[in-house]
Image (cartoon, helix red, strand yellow):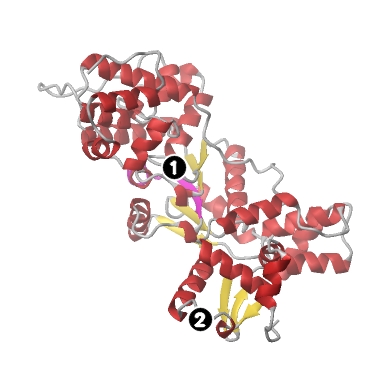
Amino acid sequence: MSTPSRDESFATLLTRLRRDAGMTQERLADRAGLSVRAVSSLECGDRRPRRYTVERLAQALRLSAEQRAVLVATAEGDRRRLPEAPSLPTANASAGPLIGRVAEVEELRAHLAGAGPPVLAYAGEPGIGRSRLLAEAVAIGGGWGIPVLTAAARRGDEGYAPLVHALADHVRRTPAAALAAQVRDCAGLDLLLPELAGRVRRLPAPTFPAATLPVLSADQARRLAFDAAVRFVDAIAGTGRLVLVLDDVQWAGADAGDLLSHLVRRAGPQVRVVLAYRPADVVAGSRFAQCAEELGRLGMVRTRVLRPLPQSEALALVDATAGDTPLGAGRQARVVRRAAGVPLFLVELTRAAGQDESEDVPWHLRLAVGRELAALPRPVFALLQRMALIATTVAVERLIADDMPTDQLLEYLDVAMRFGILDETRRGFRFRYPLVREILAAGLGPGRRRLWLGGKAHPHD
């Protein structure tokens, strides 16, 4: 096998080394204990190369010491060139005023002060206010002078994301002298955070008993990195507390749950975690879900399911958003009806109504809702479009077609309910949010409208 070149990108270098070894992506993934998707993402340049992954790949490829060093150095160079991961907004972002969450804010303050389990989790669908409460946690922690680490997961995240993104962001923001003091006793932290190589002059080296290991196994590297992360978090917290805020953890990497569970159980009561997730997108049986269940059994998580605002609080949010240019009673009532208590809908529809009397759905809100609907299985999306044309509430008998078995239809409806789009009532299946139905119906052309509405009986409105 040839010696790698330092001028290659990590993706190109890994691809060449794999081919030189005569391996397929599937074979390399199997030998390294990774998924085929992970190897493919690394070779396409879509995934950030982390130290623990690089070590697994080097062992699987049976690289020489020189080849291993070049592979590690190339990975670290790519890490420094890649864009940063998304972080959370601050509470003063254009998310609108925080109205109607008095009990939640009081609980959040008590949690950050050290009351209750170490993890406070917000569950809810898009627009319900999860990220707004996380932004409030950032603001409260910052106001109290508590170190706050934040990150948001993205679709397709793997490994330890977004937890390592929060730690990496702290590395980037912390002055070199302070960072050097925090990592002094954190041997092995660079296995998780290759960003350290560009910030501290010398990292501590792990020590072993008489029989020194020349190469750490994947399991040894993992345990070393996990314990180092605990010590790092302890050092950041100092004698006080540390707040870890994570958004959209339903998209967290497969190993993130293990690292978070280790931190929560080992870092002590000074670490307070606030996270948010969308229940419909949590993959049952995934490693992250298993870790969450484990923490729940241990009494280390308090979960709050966020509901739409009642009408009185919805009206208060509309008034607060409108500010000095209040809407008339009729337009205000229409905004409240269309939004059905969802804070994001209330804020954006109020802003649009104050600027345009046509009361069209703002394009960015239409795109946001459309993006969430597009993530549904195609047959479910098509069924919802058909229902949106028929009525707000549709009896199941209206939907039975000769080309679709009833049990399959009910399965599609179950998916729509799981994603919070439909509710089942005595009269049929009802759209939970009028605005979602409105956007679904607006996306259909006249031909399909005539086809689906032709010969239909009067709907249940």
Residue 98 appears in the figure: no
Q: Which residue is mark 2?
A: 402
Q: Name the quadrant of the N terminus.
A: top left
Q: Residue at x 40, y 13 (%)?
A: 7
Give percent across and percent down for residue 374. Answer: 57, 56
Residue 361 appears in the figure: yes
Instruction: Tell me the crowding category of disc 2: few under 14, some 14 to 19, or many 20 or more residues within 10 angstroms, Cα based.
Output: few
Amino acid on which the number 1 mark rests in the picture: Asp
Give percent across and percent down for residue 364. Answer: 71, 49
| Disc number for residue 296 | none
Instruction: Tell me the crowding category of disc 1: few under 14, some 14 to 19, or many 20 or more residues within 10 angstroms, Cα based.
Output: some
Q: Which residues are magenta?
A: 260-277
Q: Residue at x 14, y 21 (%)?
A: 212
Q: Is 272 colored magenta in this rendering?
A: yes
Q: Is 374 colored magenta in this rendering?
A: no
Decide which of 260, 5 is in the foreground and name it.
5
Quadrant of residue 50 in the image?
Answer: top left
Residue 414 position (above or below residue 305): below
Quadrant of residue 238 in the image?
Answer: top left
Q: Name the quadrant of the C terminus.
A: bottom right
Q: Secondary structure at mark 2?
A: loop
Q: Which residue is mark 1?
A: 157
Residue 461 position (above or below residue 4): below
Q: Residue at x 40, y 36 (%)?
A: 41
Amino acid on which the number 2 mark rests in the picture: Asp
Quadrant of residue 24 in the image?
Answer: top left
Give percent across and percent down for residue 174. Answer: 51, 24
